[in-house]
């Protein structure tokens, strides 16, 4: 563990600030698409039903009201330096939804419609599709799109996108 933290420190000193271990987690800062091309902040589902799965550091969110039925899109974008993408072991998505979800990362379908359930957390490795930015490549934006569907009763989605060193 000590060697890993020294390596992370050296990488950070040699190439700028080292990336945080959590890129993103569902919160009221997550964007949701209200209508085609129109985004606003998601709402935290509080309290989340006790039977719903937990992901440490993430909150259950929905479009605005946990009782709304329908399909909603949640979007997260980020950039990462090429040296950082080359240095990490993985980029893992942890996700659960009531009722279902699908995930697309940088245009690649990671989890098809309709996957999941509210009582389990699924994991997906995203590093093979991670885009890095550099002077030669320019700024490349990574985009994760989660489409969640609620059939009835309370609805929500929870996720965390974490770097694995």
Image (tube, rainbow, N blue to C red):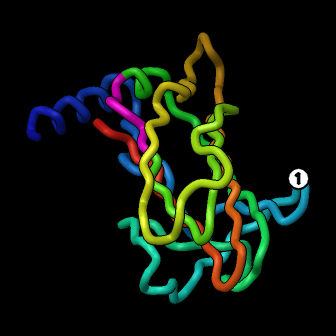
Q: Could you tell whether 158 is left or right of 143 in the image?
A: left
Q: Residue furthest top?
A: 136
Q: Residue furthest right?
A: 36
Quarter where residue 147 is shown? bottom right
Q: Could you tell whether 26 is left or right of 58 in the image?
A: right
Q: Position of residue 37 (x, y in %)?
A: 88, 53
The relative height of residue 116 versus residue 93 in the rendered view (above or below) is below
Quarter where residue 53 is shown? bottom left
Q: Quadrant of the C terminus?
A: top left
Q: Quadrant of the N terminus?
A: top left
Q: Residue furthest left?
A: 2
Dot 1 alpha-carbon crowd within 10 angstroms: few under 14, some 14 to 19, many 20 or more: few
Element carrying mark 1: loop
Q: Is 91 a magenta residue?
A: yes
Q: Which residues are magenta?
A: 87-92
Q: Position of residue 127 (x, y in %)?
A: 46, 30
Q: Is 6 a magenta residue?
A: no
Residue under pointer 1: 37
Q: Nearer the viewer, residue 26 or 146?
A: 146
Q: Position of residue 102 (x, y in %)?
A: 64, 51
**Residue at the image position 61 percent from the left and 73 percent from the top:** 156
**Residue at the image position 57 percent from the left and 26 percent from the top:** 131
């Amino acid at each position: 563990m000590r060697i890993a933290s020294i390596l992370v420190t050296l990488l950070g000193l040699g190439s700028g600030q080292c990336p945080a271990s959590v890129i993103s987690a569902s919160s009221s800062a997550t964007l949701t698409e209200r209508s085609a091309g129109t985004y606003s902040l998601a709402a935290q589902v509080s309290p989340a039903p006790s039977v719903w799965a937990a992901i440490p550091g993430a909150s259950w969110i929905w479009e605005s009201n946990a009782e709304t039925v329908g399909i909603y899109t949640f979007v997260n974008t980020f950039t990462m330096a090429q040296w950082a993408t080359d240095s990490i072991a993985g980029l893992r998505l942890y996700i659960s939804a009531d009722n279902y979800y699908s995930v697309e990362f940088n245009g690649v379908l990671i989890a098809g419609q309709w996957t999941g359930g509210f009582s389990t957390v699924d994991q997906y490795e995203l590093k093979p599709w991670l885009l890095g930015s550099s002077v030669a490549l320019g700024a490349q934006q990574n985009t994760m799109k989660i489409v969640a569907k609620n059939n009835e009763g309370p609805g929500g989605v929870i996720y965390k996108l974490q770097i694995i060193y």
